[in-house]
Amino acid sequence: MARKTENSDQLTFWDHLDQLRGSIFRILVSALALGIVVFAFKEQLFCVLLAPKNHDFVTYRVLERLAGVSFDDFSVNMINTGLAQQFMIHMKSAFAVGFLLASPYILHVLYSYVSPALYRSERRVAACLVGSGYVMFLMGVALNYFLIFPLTFRFLGTYQVSTDVPNLISLESYMSTLLMLSLVLGVMFEMPVVAWLLARMGFVTAAFMRRYRRHAIVAILIAAAVVTPTADAFTLSLVSLPIYLLYELGILVAARAEKKRINN
């Protein structure tokens, strides 16, 4: 640990290493255990993960009510193209969801390991930072699951150059797109939290972020094009717009953090 407090004065380097090893072990066990539990509930797991491909998904129903019109029903056939692919996708999806379910405990373990090296005021800041970052990550995942991925799938899954060319979407393509976009949006939603932290430390200012707004837009478009599994303009626009809005939110958050830092 970089700094010792009253609680850590008697701990040696090897004691800290043992604590770290124990924390990592608890994290791995919790994620593995919940992954196995999720794996056992295969029907329920894929009922949730495959729901956005159905025409009666909640997002489509809400949009129909808001628009006051009825959208055409759509149907996309899914196929499996590998002998062991369904089992591997089942396992990968189960452990991804298991890790997500275990994430509150994982954060608790990590915070418990780091907090003894912090002052009391720093612990409050760290708790707020971790809590807000976790909430923002979940918001990014939820936005992808309920809005970005369903609209992307509905557009690309039903797009045809000719009625003679039916769409057959592989399960691997569907799941990799869903999981990757969820991870990307979850990470990108940390932007306001990172902006607050950097502004609080004095590394960036709101004026700096405003000055380089156009550069940030270009960087956002490039990043979205690189990280999104598909290369179409529709998905690129859906992913880039929330990230840009988060950048603008980051400017506001940085301005408040900068003002608070100056006042203190």
Image (cartoon, rainbow, N blue to C red):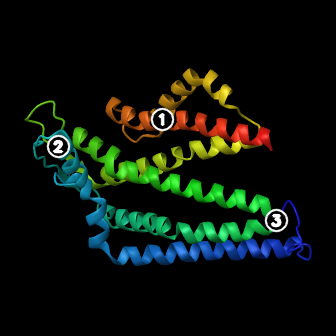
- Left or right: residue 97 versus residue 107 is left
Label 3's element?
helix
Residue in view at x 63 percent, y 28 percent: 209
Q: Is residue 199 visible?
A: no
Marks 3/1 in contact by CB < 8 Å: the verdict is no
Mark 3 and mark 2 lie on one chain; the one further toward the N terminus is 3
Residue in view at x 70 percent, y 32 percent: 205
Which of these two is toward me, 139 or 36? 139
Say which quarter of the image contains residue 124. bottom right
- Left or right: residue 127 versus residue 237 is right
The residue to which callout 1 is attached is 245
**Amino acid marked by disc 1:** Leu
Label 2's element?
loop
The residue to which callout 3 is attached is 117
Task: Quarter of the image for the C terminus: give it.
Answer: top right
- Mark 3 to mark 2: distance in Å? 56 Å
State which mark lies toward you, 3 or 1.
Answer: 1
State which mark lies toward you, 3 or 2.
Answer: 3
Dot 2 alpha-carbon crowd within 10 angstroms: few under 14, some 14 to 19, many 20 or more: some
Q: In the displayed image of the protein, which residue is found farthest to the left?
A: 164
The residue to which callout 2 is attached is 167
Label 1's element?
helix
